[in-house]
Amino acid sequence: MELINSLLFMLNEMSPYILLGFLIAGLMHAFIPQNTLARHLSGTGWKSVAKSALIGIPLPLCSCGVLPTAIAMRRNGASRAASTSFLISTPQTGVDSIAATWSLLGPAFAIIRPIAALATSFFGGMAVGQAENINQTGQNACKTDVGKSPAGFWQKCIDALKYGYIDLVGSIGGWLTGGLIIAALITVYVPADFFSVVGSKPIFSMIAVLIIAIPMYVCATGSIPIALSLIMKGLSPGTALVLLMAGPAANFASFTLISRELGRKPAIIYLVSIIIGAIAFGLAIDYLLPSEWFDISTIHSHGMHHHTFSLFSTICSVILATLLLFSFIKRYTHKKIKTNNMTKTYTVRGMNCTHCQAAVTKAISEVDGVKQVEVNLSSGKAVVNGEHNSENVINAVRNAGFDITEQSI
């Protein structure tokens, strides 16, 4: 019962802010064309790097969802420097995670989180810009349209709601649910003094968190309840920020794909920038900023013990839980394509969320001759029906930022 109460408390604290964040994210997606953004990111100087970082901060894309977006922007004219800056800033935070951070961790974390994302992305982008061969800038640019905007205002509004409350919920829903469950388990079952030893030496706990967080995959919003529960158990606020920065920003899949698309040196700079930035801001919180700004126990002590839920928060929680349940059902129920002599099956690697799944589906659907597409996120299989050329399908998926091979019969 205590586990359920703890889970419900965190859900009620976050749900109004998350729903608001989803709405804002949907409006941004529908009303700001992505190819317009790419046109501003072609240079290697500080202006294009800063623009890329500022554009990426509010976007609600996770570390895997940002990959096809950044690759498409790169091939549409963005420089390596701007692309790297975008790749670092975007997954660390977004309008949804900023709102959720405010609700669970307080205003100080909510303000510092995007500032840290801006600083680390600017540093990483400028470092890549210095190393980039200016003569090669933009050589991979193409005229591919990154995204299509709906025709009318009301259609854009419908598209915003669909993206915010269906596509985006499906993209981060699993990680948000997992983060809430892990946080509740830590809150209930981990002893209060479990982290007291490492908590007294923040630099060691930050290194330990980096070792765990960098290879793992967690979204910016899903990491928030985990960070809260760890702080409540004795870890320093600075160490929690390291988790909030490194967990969403980097994983092995991201590093591998960035190495292939941008080169080994930009990929290394990308990873080093995240590590240095996370530790620097973590130490600043623990040693330079007022500790009362990050006193989470005073923010949540009353609610954690009494579990008082307002009617509005409860309604928001029910709505969010319904959206999550719908996304899970949609993810694991597929309409099977009837196979015939025009059906081919492909294996797609690099898909980690429904955003990736949608990008692959869209890329294949636009190939000449394709009549029907079924992309299974769990198995990585893409079943394509129609009189199409396999090479065109493979090129389309690779241009979207994923690896693909055709299965032999």
Image (tube, rainbow, N blue to C red):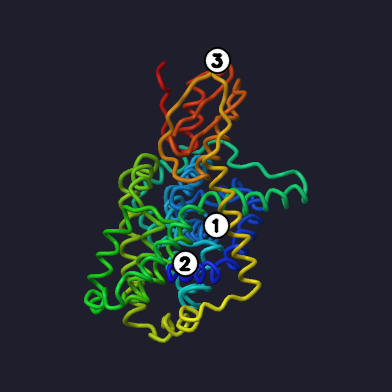
The type of residue carrying mark 1 is Leu
Please tell me how crowded label 2 is: few (under 14), some (14-19), or many (20+) other residues with Cα within 10 Å: few
Between label 2 and label 1, give the one nearer the viewer. 2
Question: Which is more N-terminal, label 1 or label 3?
Answer: 1
Q: Can you give x and y, in whole percent of width and height, for residue 207 in the image?
A: 25, 65
* Residue depth check, mark 3 versus mark 1: number of the one nearer the observer: 3
Residue 353's disc is none
Residue at 32 percent across and 56 percent down: it is 214
Q: Is residue 212 left or right of residue 317?
A: left
Report the residue marked by disc 3. 340
Along the viewing direction, whichever of 83 and 186 lies nearer the viewer: 186
Residue on which disc 2 sits: 4
Q: Secondary structure at mark 1?
A: loop
User: Where on the picture, by quarter, is residue 323?
Assistant: bottom right
Element under disc 3:
loop
Name the amino acid type tagged 3.
Asn
Q: Is residue 90 above or below residue 408?
A: below
Residue 45 image offset from top left, x and y in percent? 45, 56
According to the image, label 1 marks what residue? 59
Give the Cα distance between marks 3 and 2: 49 Å
Quarter of the image where the N terminus is located: bottom left
Q: Nearer the viewer, residue 43 or 160?
A: 160
Position of the C terminus by quadrant: top left
